[in-house]
Image: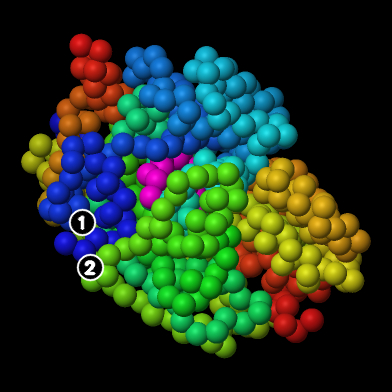
């Protein structure tokens, strides 16, 4: 039987050797895990569940990763104490991968950058955007803290083999269109529950030519369409990315020709404008040119969606020689220490400072309304983040628009939602 | 097992930020999270809850968004044991089972519930009886993989059993 990427990776990890029938969508497989992840918000309840389970040791101290990234730098006493609890657990379990302070960055930017995930891996994380690693051909999905506690103890978790929706992109994307626009288009097309319980598998000439970072952005937001995973074949450029991250021995992985897909969506992106998701759902997608009247108080560039070095370069290209609109705050949070350092060495930080941007530490920060840029009642933000639910970035009376880093930079310059091509 | 109570009705795509806004994620205690249940939807909403005597009825894709287990825990902490919905977001559905919140997926039948309906849920029979309009709704059996977890009294109990088997 020809298999999709989702079928192939889950079946390959089945604890009991899986035959073709076991890999059929809907079958439940108990699978070995390559990596188990939690952050400063989800690790504390996972640790409590772990203890309730009577678990003593994690299944493999090299494969349980804790990243302190959401409420960092510690924003108040309670968040500091959550991190203390995580730190204590990491020390007791002698975890190889505990990231805090200057070693930490936004988890889904950090793990691929450090080479901790690779093609064909099966990864679970107590964070919905764990699906990001599908950008390098890993089957990765978010779960809650109790599932993650079980995964930490057993090194296994159960999965229902998902059906896959295939999305193929062809044509010539414009200079200001990237992975963010393609995933927003997809969510707009199928809706926020369009891939519920399914996997999204992306391919086509536009994907083949897309830098790996763009694929990570797309896989990251697969969950905004309800998907369990967003998957890309691991091709030569994915292998190069992983090799640069210090990995060895990775191999290409692709879906089998003739695999069964629940649906096949095709899109020619020629002539497509950058897209913006309007409040209060990621499916409310409009072309940027239709939103010229929307004024903005805050722009955020960063997050696990668009906080990588390619995103910083894209924003800097737009900011070069220009100024942030007076009265608007533009907050840039490079997602990892590595991204920060590269941005500094490449002169991007200077460009941002000259433009009047605020540059912050690697942190999830305002994306989930934690800190470092909260909206008051009546305020509006345009962000490169992934969710625009009501109240997501602060007041219930505030609004969030989602777009790519180029649109974000252009919007910061003019103070209204702006197509960079119009500058 | 039977659960009875009055329905509280919410709409489609109620996300986890609506169920429990991120600012409250500095605790994982049910009582504390329950005090802020649905604050992202309407900070006054929780006043309608009669602890132990309210059931939640929701539209499509309930619990979409974050993986925060705090969401089902907040609903439980507020005194609600059962959520009946058109459909659930995947992570929320798993989290609900793991934490002891009962998620019942009923598809289009959810539209038959009005705020304040008297509802009785019979888990064994797989039936929801709406006493206010006299209608019976069936719900599909618990998926096979989850039954083993429920039989062990939730995921913590299941893992405890598995760990004991390994050391034997």
- The answer to which image quadrant residue A3 occupies is bottom left
3D distance between C-alphas at marks 1 and 2: 10 Å
A175 versus B54 height, above or below: below
The answer to which of A297 and A37 lies nearer the viewer is A37
Image position of A73 (left or right of A227): right
Q: Earlier in the sequence, mark 1 or mark 2?
A: 1
Indicate the position of residue A275 as horizontal and vertical percent values.
58, 75
A145 versus A209 height, above or below: above
Q: In the orientation shown, which residue stands out farthest toward the top?
A: B168
Q: Residue at x 37, y 44 (%)?
A: A122
The answer to which of B139 and A263 lies nearer the viewer is A263
Q: Which residue is mark 1?
A: A25
Image disc number at residue A108: none
Circle 1 Cα neighbour tier, 10 Å, few/some/many (<14 / 14–19 / ≥20): some
- Label 2 marks a residue whose chain is A
For the magenta stretch, what is the residue range? A120-132
Same-chain status of marks 1 and 2: yes
The answer to which of A183 and A138 lies nearer the viewer is A138
- The answer to which image quadrant residue A2 occupies is bottom left
- Label 1 marks a residue whose chain is A
Q: Is residue A122 magenta?
A: yes
A24 versus B69 height, above or below: below
């Amino acid at each position: 039987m020809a298999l999709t990427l989702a079928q192939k990776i889950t079946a390959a990890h089945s604890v009991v050797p899986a035959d073709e029938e076991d890999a059929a969508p809907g079958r439940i497989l108990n699978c070995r895990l390559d990596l188990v992840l939690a952050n400063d918000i989800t690790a504390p309840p996972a640790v409590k569940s772990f203890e309730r389970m009577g678990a003593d040791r994690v299944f493999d101290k090299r494969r349980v990763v804790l990243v302190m990234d959401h409420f960092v730098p510690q924003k108040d006493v309670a968040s500091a104490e959550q991190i203390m609890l995580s730190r204590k657990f990491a020390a007791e379990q002698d975890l190889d991968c505990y990231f805090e302070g200057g070693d930490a960055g936004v988890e889904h930017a950090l793990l691929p950058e450090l080479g901790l995930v690779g093609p064909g891996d099966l990864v679970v994380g107590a964070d919905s955007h764990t699906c990001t690693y599908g950008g390098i051909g890993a089957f990765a999905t978010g779960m809650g803290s109790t599932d993650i506690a079980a995964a930490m103890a057993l090194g296994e978790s159960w999965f229902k083999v998902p059906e896959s929706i295939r999305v193929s992109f062809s044509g010539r994307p414009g200079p200001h269109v990237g992975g963010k626009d393609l995933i927003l288009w997809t969510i707009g097309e199928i809706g926020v529950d369009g891939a519920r319980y399914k996997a999204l598998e992306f391919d086509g000439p536009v994907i083949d030519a897309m830098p790996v970072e763009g694929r990570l952005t797309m896989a990251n937001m697969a969950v905004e369409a309800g998907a369990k995973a967003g998957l890309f074949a691991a091709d030569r450029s994915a292998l190069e990315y992983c090799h640069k991250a210090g990995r060895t021995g990775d191999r290409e992985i692709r879906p089998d020709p003739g695999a069964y897909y629940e649906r096949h969506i095709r899109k020619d992106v020629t002539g497509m404008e950058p897209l913006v998701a309007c409040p209060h759902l990621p499916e409310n997608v409009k072309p940027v040119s239709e939103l010229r009247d929307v004024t903005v108080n805050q722009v955020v560039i960063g997050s696990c969606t668009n906080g990588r070095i390619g995103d910083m370069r894209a924003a800097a290209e737009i900011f070069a020689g220009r100024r942030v609109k007076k009265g608007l705050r533009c907050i840039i949070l490079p997602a990892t220490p590595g991204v920060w350092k590269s941005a500094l060495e490449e002169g991007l930080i200077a460009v941002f400072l000259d433009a009047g941007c605020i540059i912050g530490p690697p942190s999830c920060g305002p994306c989930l309304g934690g800190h470092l840029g909260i909206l008051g009642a009546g305020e509006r933000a345009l962000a490169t983040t992934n969710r625009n639910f009501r109240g997501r970035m602060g007041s219930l009376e505030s609004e969030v628009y989602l777009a790519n880093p180029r649109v974000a930079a252009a919007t910061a310059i003019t103070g209204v939602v702006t197509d960079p091509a119009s500058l | 097992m039977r659960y009875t109570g009055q329905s509280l009705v919410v709409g489609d795509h109620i996300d986890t930020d609506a169920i429990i806004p991120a600012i409250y994620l500095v605790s994982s205690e049910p009582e504390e999270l329950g005090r802020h249940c649905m604050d992202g939807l309407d900070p006054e909403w929780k006043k309608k809850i009669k602890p132990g005597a309210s059931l939640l009825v929701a539209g499509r894709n309930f619990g979409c968004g974050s993986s925060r287990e705090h969401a089902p825990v907040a609903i439980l902490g507020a005194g609600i044991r059962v959520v009946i919905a058109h459909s659930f977001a995947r992570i929320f559905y798993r989290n609900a089972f793991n934490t002891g919140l009962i998620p019942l997926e009923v598809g289009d039948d959810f539209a038959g519930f009005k705020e304040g309906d008297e509802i009785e849920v019979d888990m064994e029979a797989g039936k929801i009886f709406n006493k206010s309009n006299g209608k019976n709704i069936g719900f599909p059996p618990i998926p096979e993989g989850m039954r083993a977890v429920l039989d062990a009294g939730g995921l913590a109990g299941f893992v405890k059993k598995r760990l004991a088997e390994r050391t034997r």
